[in-house]
Image (spheres, grey):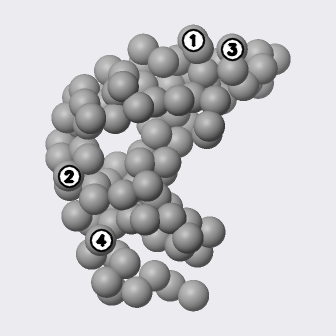
């Protein structure tokens, strides 16, 4: 079942508040993932936060490459934390910087 119009508006607002300089293409991907059925139990802000971090991790870092090379999850997350922080700063998502707990994702 598709997300309601109200939920989509909440997700849009949450993304604009959390990461106002997210490029359009990236924002579209993040909004779609945050609106997925398995994210319905989360608030829009939490859905966007988790989706945003996962999207950056898989799209803009070496995380998948490091995992493919045999690094465990926590080690790979350790090595990419600067890449994630850089992208969060670029997108003006600085409120997420101190809250990042890579082990929860």
Q: CA distance from mark 1 to mark 3?
A: 6 Å
Q: CA distance from mark 3 to mark 2?
A: 30 Å
Provide the residue designation for mark 3: 75
Mark 4 near mark 3, Cβ–Cβ under 8 Å? Answer: no
Picture residue at 29% right of the left edge, 71% below the top = 10
Q: What crowding class fits label 4: few (fewer than 14 Cα within 10 Å), some (14-19), or many (20 or more)? A: some
Q: Would you place residue 67 above or below residue 1 in this image?
A: above
Provide the residue designation for mark 4: 10
Mark 1 near mark 2, Cβ–Cβ under 8 Å? Answer: no
Would you say 4 lies left or right of 103 here?
left
Mark 1 near mark 3, Cβ–Cβ under 8 Å? Answer: yes
Viewer-nearest residue: 85 or 44: 44
- Mark before the other along the chain sequence, 4 or 3: 4
Q: CA distance from mark 4 to mark 3?
A: 34 Å
Viewer-nearest residue: 86 or 105: 105
- Judged from this view, the residue extending furthest toward the right is 70
Q: Would you place residue 80 above or below residue 59 in this image?
A: above
- Mark before the other along the chain sequence, 2 or 4: 4
Picture residue at 64% right of the left edge, 30% below the top = 103
Mark 4 near mark 1, Cβ–Cβ under 8 Å? Answer: no
**Residue 29, picture quadrant:** bottom left
Q: Quarter holding the C terminus?
A: top right
Provide residue 40's location: percent of width, then percent of height: 53, 73
**Residue 36, picture quadrant:** bottom right
């Amino acid at each position: 079942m598709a997300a309601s119009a109200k939920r989509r508006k909440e997700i849009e607002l949450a993304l604009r508040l959390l990461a106002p300089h997210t490029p359009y293409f990236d924002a579209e991907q993040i909004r779609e993932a945050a609106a997925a059925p398995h994210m319905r139990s989360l608030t829009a802000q939490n859905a966007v936060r988790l989706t945003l971090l996962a999207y950056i991790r898989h799209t803009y870092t070496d995380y998948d490459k490091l995992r493919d090379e045999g690094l465990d999850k926590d080690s790979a997350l350790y090595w990419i934390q600067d890449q994630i922080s850089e992208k969060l700063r670029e997108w003006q998502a600085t409120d997420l910087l101190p809250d990042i707990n890579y082990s929860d994702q």
